[in-house]
Amino acid sequence: MTADHAPLAHRVATVPNAISALRLALVPVFVWLVVRHWDVWAIAVMAFSGVTDWLDGFAARRLRQYSRLGQLLDPAADRLFILCTVFLLGWRAIIPWWLVASLAAREAVMGMALLMLKLRGIDPPAVVFVGKAATFALMYAFPLLLLAEQGGWVERVAWVAGWACAIWGLMLYWVACVVYLVESWRALRLAPGGAVVGQAAP
């Protein structure tokens, strides 16, 4: 975080934070829709979540409203939405459990790494492009796979496109995980006393 952003570091009431909070609030709505098999509405909510994922970052850059809370809310909303979607689609047998397990294992690894950093008083690594690309691919994969369940002429196209996005998203998700682990290891080595070594990007 640059010096220009420092005065905003602890602000809560910002436009990007409000957008991320809205995305978090949509998670239980999405869960309820999928459980009730109201798939078209669930797809609409997922698509809206994908738009707001881009919008909060755009608003942060355009309005220069960076904050520590935003650094936590944005990835938390992404991860929660993806994990809920993965487990629900696994529960409905739309995706295989190996895919659920792989994505859940990645989140477990990341969670342990972030916990170690937090215990040492070190900020999480900056969000990298490959991580955002993975999230973007997965956010497209799951509504497409859900759409493929509706039948009709779009079923085959949605199934192929959905699985293409899911496979690419899964690979990029693990690549991003390796990048974050390397950055976390470097941070731990550079801060043996637990001093904060840098600020994470929003």
Image (cartoon, rainbow, N blue to C red):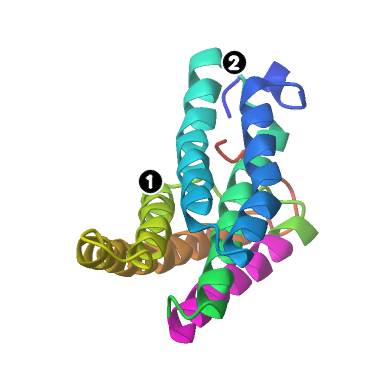
Q: Where in the figure is residue 110, as x and y percent of width and height?
A: 59, 66
The residue shown at (75%, 54%) is 194
Could you tell me which secondary element the residue under label 2 belongs to?
loop
Figure check: 143 above or below 127: below
Type of amino acid under label 1: Phe
Q: Is residue 66 visible?
A: yes
Binning the other alpha carbons within 10 Å of mark 1 as few (below 14), some (14 to 19) or many (20 upward) gives few
Q: Amino acid at mark 2?
A: Asp
| Quadrant of image for the N terminus | top right
Q: Quadrant of residue 178?
A: bottom left
Identify the mark at residue 165; answer none if there is no mark: none
Instruction: Identify the mark at residue 129; answer none if there is no mark.
Output: 1
Name the residue carrying label 2.
4
Of 156 and 179, the residue lying toward us: 156
Main SS type for the magenta part? helix
The boundaries of the magenta stretch are 96-116
Marks 2 and 1, the one that precedes in the sequence? 2
From this view, report whether residue 68 is shown above or below residue 188. Answer: above
Gap between marks 2 and 1 measured at Cα: 22 Å
Residue at position x 54%, y 60% from top? 82
Across and down, in percent, residue 164 comes to: 25, 65
Quick check: is 70 in the magenta stretch? no
Across and down, in percent, residue 64 comes to 56, 17
x, y (%) of residue 112? Answer: 67, 70
Give the quarter of the figure containing the C terminus.
Answer: top right
> Going by the image, does 34 lie left or right of 139?
right
Say which element carries label 1: helix
